[in-house]
Image (cartoon, rainbow, N blue to C red):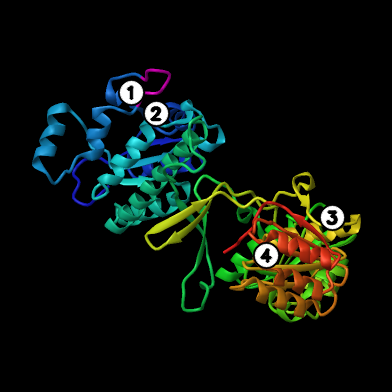
């Protein structure tokens, strides 16, 4: 209730999520408020002994159309939208016998829980938006987390401050905006004529965590959740370590997704600045971690580690002398946590598997680019052996690992792998020859007999020759260059097996 009002305060309470609503109503009544309510909320309050006026008693119009019409009525919206400093508005209310409403407590149907026409709320959003529009006078509460703050202020001050009403109005519009976005998504998904990329993308982001800083300490950073959607971050638990920074989150996400893309066997990855600097698959997770670290120990300093198995004491022991920023896994042995606890600067995350993205969105100032996610198709039947030699079974395993990793390395990239271990990664280069040179230097002879993966085709045979110089036995690449035959001929000269996947995996 705003200052200067000369009527008895009234609250309209209509919520789907009834958490805390009885206590809220009881405290409002104790302050002299009248409670008006509808449907299930009215019944819940009455059952708890809270004096409540049914909304149909206020409107003189019983619910109709199976509850689709309850609060959509001039008596309700007149009471919400009236500007009591405007004599004309006051006169209109008096002529029609309408009493002002000073507080709306309303949250909407959880549309995503059961998307359907019946879950599209009409009266709720209309009330919330009306109250928020008139926030100079009316308070509006859409989340139970705000009940305590609102009640404390009403009890202490006798009304809500302008700042509080404005903050609540902002939260209300965010609530209805996110709700509308969920419905837009559903209508897009169920439209048989919808394009692969929709004509509009309704996006509401809810801040979940304020980060230590952004990419650099002078930048602010926060992690947000797409409203109505769930991310693995929502269920992740930080078991130890200081607060996460922007890059910690960015790199941990890249590591966790890569670890879950390397197949069903125990796998470990090391990420630095969003690029893998190590990846390996083995028969046990401790061996996988050690081999992932061995790929590039220098770059692994201060890196992010993710494993797709329980972290054992053996893994923790292997990490003991390695400075690591973040470790992500689904489970931890108690003995492992005890060992990891000695590394006070290590952030330890326990997390569920990562979810698949529907769309990828990148902002460009006041614009954005949207694309479908890059799905790595591991289907040998769609790949083509283009050389005289074909890979052996062991060589296929290295080719597949190198290809999976290359798809998650910044372009241009070359990945060298041997015995299901990445041994050399050249990332983010402006030309493919430099990427190959860096990968070979990091491999330092360990790629002999192994696989070379290129995220895009070789434009010249020099890239193939570089793989041969690194003593790779096999190559996997998309193909599609005007000089493909030249590259194939070079592979045959070196007695290498080469696979064309027909699918490029640039990553920027």
Residues drawn in magenta: 63-70
Left/right placement of residue 321 relative to residue 413 reads right
* Label 1 crowd (10 A; few <14 / some 14-19 / many >=20): some
Label 1, label 2: how far apart the Cα atoms are? 8 Å
Q: Nearer the viewer, mark 1 or mark 4?
A: 4
Q: Nearer the viewer, residue 285 or 386?
A: 386
Image position of 181 with respect to 478: above or below: above
Report the residue marked by disc 1: 56
Quarter assignment of residue 130: top left
Number of residues whose C-alpha sits closer than 10 Å to that of mark 4, classed few (under 14), some (14–19) or many (20 or more): many
Q: Residue at x 27, y 48 (%)?
A: 135
Q: Is residue 419 above or below residue 37?
A: below
Q: Is residue 179 magenta?
A: no
| Vertical side of 221 occupied by 50: above or below | above
Labels 1 and 3 touching (C-beta < 8 A)? no
Pinpoint residue 307: horizontal percent, then vertical percent.
77, 62
Residue under label 4, please give it. Answer: 458
Instruction: Look at mark 2 in the image and give the residue it sits on.
Output: 38
Residue 265's label in the rendered image is 3
Residue at image position (80%, 64%) is 491
Circle nearer the viewer, 2 or 4: 4
């Amino acid at each position: 209730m705003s200052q200067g009002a000369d009527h008895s305060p009234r609250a309209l309470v209509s919520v789907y999520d009834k958490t805390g609503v009885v206590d809220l109503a009881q405290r409002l009544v104790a302050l002299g408020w009248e409670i008006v309510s509808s449907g299930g909320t009215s019944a819940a309050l009455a059952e708890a002994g809270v004096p409540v006026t049914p909304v149909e008693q206020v409107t003189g119009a019983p619910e109709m159309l199976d509850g689709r019409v309850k609060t959509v009525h001039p008596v309700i919206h007149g009471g919400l939208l009236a500007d009591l400093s405007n004599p004309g508005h006051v006169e209109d209310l008096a002529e029609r016998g309408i009493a002002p409403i000073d507080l709306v407590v309303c949250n909407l149907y959880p549309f995503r829980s059961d998307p359907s026409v019946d879950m599209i709320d009409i009266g709720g959003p209309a009330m919330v938006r009306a109250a928020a529009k008139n926030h100079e006078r009316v308070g509006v509460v859409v989340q139970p987390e705000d009940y305590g703050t609102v009640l404390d202020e009403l009890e202490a001050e006798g009304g809500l401050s302008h700042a509080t009403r404005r903050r609540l109005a902002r939260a209300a519009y965010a609530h209805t905006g996110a709700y509308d976005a969920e419905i837009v998504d559903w209508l897009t998904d169920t439209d048989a004529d919808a394009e692969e990329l929709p004509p509009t993308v309704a996006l509401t982001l809810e801040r979940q965590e304020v980060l230590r800083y952004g990419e650099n300490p002078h930048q602010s950073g926060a992690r947000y959740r797409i409203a109505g959607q769930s991310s693995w971050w929502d269920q992740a638990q930080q078991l130890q370590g200081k607060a996460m920074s922007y890059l910690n989150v960015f790199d941990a996400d890249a590591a966790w997704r890569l670890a879950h893309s390397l197949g069903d066997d125990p796998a470990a990855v090391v990420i630095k600045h969003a690029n893998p600097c190590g990846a390996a698959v083995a028969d046990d997770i401790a061996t996988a971690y050690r081999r992932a670290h061995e790929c590039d120990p220098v770059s692994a300093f201060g890196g992010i580690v993710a494993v797709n198995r329980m972290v054992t004491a053996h893994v923790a022991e292997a990490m003991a002398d390695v400075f690591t920023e973040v470790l992500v896994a689904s489970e931890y042995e108690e003995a492992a946590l005890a060992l990891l606890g000695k590394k006070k600067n290590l952030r330890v995350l326990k997390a569920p598997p990562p979810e698949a993205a529907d769309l990828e969105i990148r902002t460009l100032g006041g614009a954005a680019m949207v694309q479908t996610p890059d799905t790595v198709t591991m289907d040998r039947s769609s790949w083509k052996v283009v050389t005289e030699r074909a890979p052996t079974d062991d060589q296929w395993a290295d080719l597949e690992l190198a290809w999976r990793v290359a798809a998650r390395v910044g372009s241009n990239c070359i990945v060298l792998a041997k015995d299901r271990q990445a041994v050399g990664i050249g990332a983010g280069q402006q030309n493919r020859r430099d990427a190959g040179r860096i990968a070979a230097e990091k491999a330092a002879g360990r790629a002999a007999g192994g696989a070379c993966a290129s995220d895009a085709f070789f434009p010249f045979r020099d890239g193939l020759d570089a793989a041969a110089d690194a003593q790779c036995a096999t190559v996997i690449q998309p193909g599609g260059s005007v000089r493909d035959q030249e590259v194939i001929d070079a592979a045959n000269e070196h007695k290498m097996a080469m696979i064309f996947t027909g699918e490029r995996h640039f990553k920027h």
